[in-house]
Every structure is written in structure tokens, then in C-alpha cells.
Amino acid sequence: MSNETPVWRFKYLPKKLDDISGRSEIITRLKEMIKKRNFPHLLFVGSEGIGKTLIAQLFSKEFLGRFYDANFKIVFADEPLSSEERDQARSEAYVSTSKIGSMAGKRITTPAFIQVRVKPFVQLRAIGDVPYKILVVKNFEALGSDQQGFRRLMEIYGSNCRMILITTKISGIIDPIVSRCQLFLIPQIKYEDFSTLIEDIANKESLQLENGVIEYLYKISEGKIAKAIDLLQICSVTGNTIDLNKLYKILKKYENQEIKDLLIKSLKGDFSEIRDCFREILSNYKYSVQDLFIQFTEILNKLPLSKYAKIKLINMIADADFRAIDGRDDDIQISYLLARLNSFAQNM
């Protein structure tokens, strides 16, 4: 293993489009747009952690060149606005001057997310020798009904700024948005490309991978390269030879740590991050909701909490588990439990 031990997922992070493994068809299409210095709004669709944002950023860097910093912005549609941002959006609302119709004299507000985080960037002209700016919007489906307002923004400022919208669920995007974008489906990387990349990293880090390790790594990571590299680096800490037994043990510790982190975030009140965390855990490890509640209970018993607190929290888990077994929506029941844990911790 190399003497220098940074986080490998960053050490081996692609620096340009040509460095990306297993996406040759997508990269070819994007490089053609760069060559023509023109592209429509884009919609990237794929599972969480598959590389959509990385591709969008590298494409933007190569398209904008040395003017990248001044003309690129990334925003998260599911990130709550601060109270200051909401106050700003309200202050910038205007009163309709129309004397007829249902909106006559009414106060009109642009959706706060668009008004505060998007509009100030897209309405200014591009700086330097580039045809337009690039705005990347992650988790775009989270805008919900505000997507209509975003559609109008795309029409008004489309000649000045191109949008790259990123989502895991195309079903959450309204048809008028989809019809205005060129669609890119980002699938799971093929095993052959995954294997070549992992073997290359193993050689550079002087690792010996036993038979079946790469196949198992591909299966448990679902082809998500960053997760696979993280597991590989954790395994390397105890020696340069990695076999299936070591990989399995490390995976169980890795899963338990992520669940523990989720539970502690809930008890500390970091509720804005909790929802994404549990969805990623369920997606990555294919837990059933009952499995997750069992893990919660086991970890909770090991935390330095009072007997009273543990009893109250375990009762909350049992209640959520009962509701889930009764056929209620799993996502809602987990959200409900984490919200209750969060509320209990704040009142302790």
C-alpha cells in the first residue's frame, strides 16, 4: 500500500470526462456538445451515488474552460431555505398592477427557492468567452409544484443559462420540464469496466485481491464506484491481502457505523440530513424496514443513555415497527420515528 494515504475516493476521482470509466457512450455525446459549443437543457436520471453530479461538473468544466468559476453554480432542490432566505423572498414579492382578473391587486411571489437561489444567478449574463452559464440542480424532483415556476425560468433565461437537472426519479418530474430537456439515463456501470478500474487501483496500492472479491464488491456496491473504493480502502488498513472473509466483516462494520451515525444524528437534532441518510442506507444495503428497526434497537442499547431514555426510545421504535407491519408506508413510518427521536432529544 502507498505510504501516502489520502481518502482514495478523492485520490482516484476523475479529473476530466475521459477519465470516467464505463460511460463511453454518454461521454461521446457530451464531448460532441463541447465541440459544438452548444447544448440544450439536460436531465440526468440515475440511482443515488451512480456519478450523475460528477459527470455534470466535469462536463461543465470542459465546456466553460477558464471561465468555469464565474459561470457555474450547483444548488440542491431539497435543501431547506434559511429564515433569512425566506425573508428575502417575501421582501422581493410584488403587487399585481392588473385591474381585471383573479390576480388584480394581489401579492405575487416567485417560489422562494427560485427567487433566492436560482434567479440571481441565471438572470445575469455569462462572463467571458462562453455562450452561456451552467446551473446544476440536484434532487430536482424535490421542487414538487414549484417545478412550474422553474419551467418559466428555463424559458425566460434559457438563452443566457443552460440547466442540468439531476434526479433519481424521472416520475417526479413534470412533463413540461422533461420535454424541454435532453435526457441522459445514467445506468449502473458494467462489471467489466468496474473490474478493470478496481484492479487498476489495487495494483497502484499494492493490494492482492483474492478470487471472488471484485465480484462481491460489485454486487454489494451495486456498481457504485465511490462506495466500492471506500470499502477497499477500509479493508487495506489491516493488510494488503483482501479475501471474501475480510470484505464481509468490514462490510458489516461499515453498515453498522452508518446506521449508528443516522441514529446519533436523529438524537442530536440534525433533522435536515436524516431523511436522505436513511434512504441511502436502505438503498445501499437493501434493508427491510424491520431490519433497520432491529439495528436501531441493538445500537440504542449500547449508547450511554439513561434507563428512562432507552425505554422511551425503544417504545417509539416498537410503535413505528408495529405501524410498518400493519401495512403503513415504510418511508413515512421511518420518517415518523426519526422525527419523534429528534423531538424527544430536543426536550431532554
Image: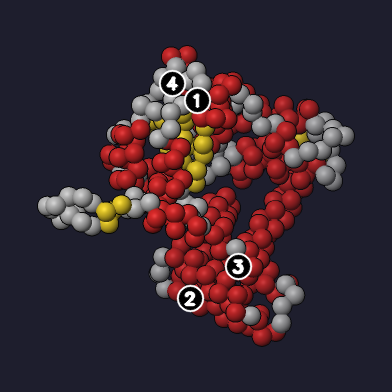
Image quadrant occupied by the C terminus: bottom right
Callout in the foreground (4, 3)? 4
Whether residue 340 is situated above or below residue 262 in the rendered picture:
below
**Residue behind mark 2:** 322
Callout in the foreground (2, 1)? 1
Whether residue 11 is situated above or below residue 340 in the rendered picture:
above
Give the CA distance from mark 4 to mark 1: 9 Å
Callout in the foreground (3, 2)? 3
Q: Which amino acid does the dot numbered 4 rest on?
A: Pro
Q: Which residue: 62% across, 37% down?
A: 225
**Residue behind mark 4:** 131
Q: Earlier in the sequence, mark 4 or mark 2?
A: 4
Q: Earlier in the sequence, mark 3 or mark 2?
A: 3
Q: Earlier in the sequence, mark 2 or mark 1?
A: 1
Q: Which residue: 44% across, 54% down?
A: 88
**Residue behind mark 1:** 127
- How far across and how far down the image is residue 203, in percent? 78, 27
**Residue behind mark 3:** 269
Residue 20: quarter of image:
top right
Which secondary structure lies at badge 2?
helix
Binning the other alpha carbons within 10 Å of mark 3 as few (below 14), some (14 to 19) or many (20 upward) gives some
Q: Which amino acid does the dot numbered 1 rest on?
A: Ile
Give the CA distance from mark 2 to mark 1: 57 Å
